[in-house]
Each structure stands twice: as structure tokens, then as C-alpha cells.
Image (spheres, rainbow, N blue to C red):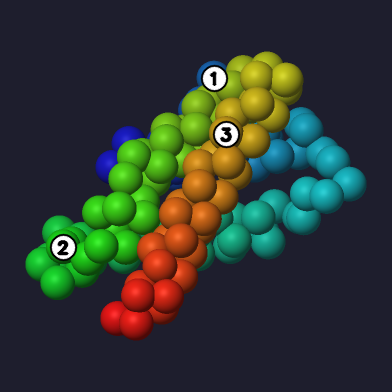
């Protein structure tokens, strides 16, 4: 909810975060790897859409909520990824580029932990013959 609220404030308000709209923020910090504003907004829209589906799926579907892949494979890494992403955006909006990079790497590491944990669970069930 906090991540989606931050995204909404940055995207749909005139003030944004730290007085900069989302578009101003992206144009203030161009890089060689950053796509244009519209492509970036589309990509983040897809990411937030699937993040929302993931959250709703956990709430609405007990079979998914009680899954071993969710309980053991994700644990607190999803929360860490969301918190790192939120902090990344806030530090970027304030022009703290090194801190921003650190939090972006933190979100990436949390996502890697999720992938590795789930891989180990799936691989373990294949070995046990389940």
C-alpha cells in the first residue's frame, strides 16, 4: 500500500516528491540506460500491476496464501524489496544519488533472495520425489 501510494503521489500530483513531479525527476537525472519517460512509466505500471495482483492473490486465495513457496520462499524478502524500492525513489527525488544506488541494489538483492529461496524449495521437492 505504501509503495503504491508513493507511486501515485509521484505520478499523479502536481507537487510530486520533494517538489518534483515524476517527469521532472526522470529528466533531471538522465543516464545511458534509462529509457524515455513514457517507456519507463509503462514498465513501472506493469510492475505495480503485478505487485498488486500478487498482494490481492495472497489475501483472496487461501490456497496461494498457504503455499510453501510463499511462506518459505519469500518470507520477509518481499517486504524488504518494497521498502528498498520506496526508499530508492525517495532518495532519488532528493538527489541523493549514492544512497539511491544503494537502495536500488538492496531491492535487487531482495529479489535475488526470493528467486534463490524458491528455486531451492522447488529443487528440494523434485529431489524428494514429491
* N-term-proximal mark, 1 vs 2: 1
* N-term-proximal mark, 3 vs 2: 2
- The disc at residue 70 is none
- The disc at residue 106 is 3
Q: Position of residue 72 (x, y in %)?
A: 30, 53
Image-based side of 112 in relation to 64, left or right: right
Q: Position of residue 58 (x, y in %)?
A: 20, 61
Between 15 and 116, the one nearer to me in the picture:
116
What residue does disc 1 label? 18
State the separation of the CA atoms marked 1 and 2.
40 Å
Between 101 and 15, the one nearer to me in the picture:
101
State the separation of the CA atoms marked 3 and 2.
27 Å
Helix, strand or loop status at disc 2: loop
* N-term-proximal mark, 3 vs 1: 1
Quarter that holds the C terminus: bottom left
Which of the two discs, 3 and 1, sits closer to the camera?
Answer: 3
What residue does disc 2 label? 66
Amino acid at each position: 500500500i505504501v509503495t503504491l501510494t508513493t507511486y501515485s503521489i509521484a505520478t499523479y500530483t502536481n507537487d510530486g516528491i520533494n517538489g518534483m513531479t515524476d517527469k521532472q525527476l526522470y529528466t533531471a537525472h538522465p543516464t545511458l540506460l534509462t529509457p524515455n519517460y513514457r517507456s519507463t512509466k509503462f514498465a513501472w505500471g506493469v510492475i505495480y500491476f503485478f505487485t498488486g495482483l500478487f498482494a490481492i492473490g495472497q489475501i483472496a486465495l487461501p490456497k496461494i496464501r498457504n503455499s510453501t513457496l510463499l511462506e518459505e520462499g519469500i518470507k520477509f524478502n518481499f517486504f524488504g524489496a518494497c521498502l528498498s524500492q520506496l526508499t530508492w525513489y525517495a532518495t532519488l527525488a532528493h538527489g541523493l544519488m549514492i544512497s539511491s544506488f544503494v537502495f536500488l541494489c538492496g531491492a535487487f538483492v531482495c529479489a535475488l533472495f526470493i528467486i534463490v529461496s524458491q528455486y531451492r524449495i522447488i529443487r528440494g521437492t523434485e529431489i524428494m520425489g514429491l
